[in-house]
Image (spheres, rainbow, N blue to C red):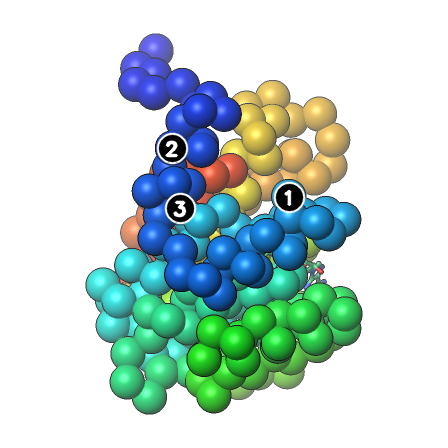
Amino acid sequence: MALVKTQVTQEVADYLARHARQDAVLERVARETAEMPHAEMATTPDEAALLTMLARLIGARRALEVGTFTGYGAISIARGLGDGGRLTCLELNEEYAAIARRNLEDAGVADRTEIVVGPALQSLRAMPAEPSFDYVFLDADKTGYPDYYEELVPRLLPGGLLLIDNVLLRGRVTDPHDERERLIDELNDRVTADERVDSVMVLVADGLTFARRR
Ligand SMILES: C[S@@+](CC[C@H](N)C(=O)[O-])C[C@H]1O[C@@H](n2cnc3c(N)ncnc32)[C@H](O)[C@@H]1O
């Protein structure tokens, strides 16, 4: 049996959030997003800080976010990009895209960010099929993940990093009961066995898989 080293309690989650550096813009975005319906969709401060850190560590220059909501994660990715870096965000909902656009402007990263509104699968398939991204954050509708994964891996440059969010579905993947839970469980198995990538699943927020293109 695997060893549980830290139980994730509310206190631990708050502690992690408190130790993620947020500036005034991210604080405002978090505060305003918390007042919206579906606020729980937003990336947590500690996970967002990780997004920035990872972008810096790999020197990301061509980034993609699938599922943007109010832009908390997008701001964090854009801030981690190297010189001349660009972030493309795919978002279905025009209202969310408009909020994200304002937030990206306020954060001073609108110049390096583009938001494409529409179904992400359609937007992805309209992109060139060859490798062009070095950093991808997948965080949209979970039932779409298997299809997104198959579109995203070929578009990753060698050494490029694909981050897949919510891979634990609040622990439900351990005993899937519906289609969504089964799909994510199967995808997790598929990523683990996929020879095209090196991968690791870590307990950040709702579970985050790192898949690095070989
Ligand atoms: C978990 S939220 C994204 C959170 C965001 N990454 C952040 O950092 O706060 C998921 C987003 O995916 C969007 N979405 C859902 N289905 C989609 C689709 N088919 N294509 C594009 N975006 C979609 C939702 O509108 C929502 O904004």
Which image quarter has ligand 1?
bottom right
Mark identifier at residue 40: 1
- Which of discs 1 and 2 lies nearer the camera? The answer is 2
Up the image or down, 145 lies above or below 109; here it is above
Q: Quadrant of residue 176?
A: top right
Left/right placement of residue 115 relative to residue 196 reads right
Q: Earlier in the sequence, mark 1 or mark 3?
A: 1
User: Which of 182/93 is in front?
Assistant: 93
Instruction: Please tell me which residue lies in front, 10 or 204.
Output: 10
Residue at x 51%, y 83% (from the top left corner):
110
**Mark seen at residue 200:** none
Local secondary structure at mark 3: helix
Indicate the amino acid at tag 3.
Asp
- Which residue is found at the position 51% from the left and 38% from the top? 206
Vertical placement of residue 69 versus 43, above or below: below
Image quadrant occupied by the C terminus:
bottom left
Q: 10 Å neighbourhood of mark 2: few (<14), some, or many (≥20)?
A: few
Reading the image, the residue beneath label 2 is 15
Q: Disc 1 to disc 2, how far (Cα)?
A: 18 Å
Residue 89 image point, x, y percent? 56, 73
In terms of depth relative to the viewer, which is nearer, 156 or 28? 28
**Cα–Cα gap, marks 3 and 2:** 10 Å
Q: Residue at x 76, y 70 (%)?
A: 95
Residue 210 location in percent, x, y? Answer: 37, 51
Circle 3 is placed at which residue position? 46
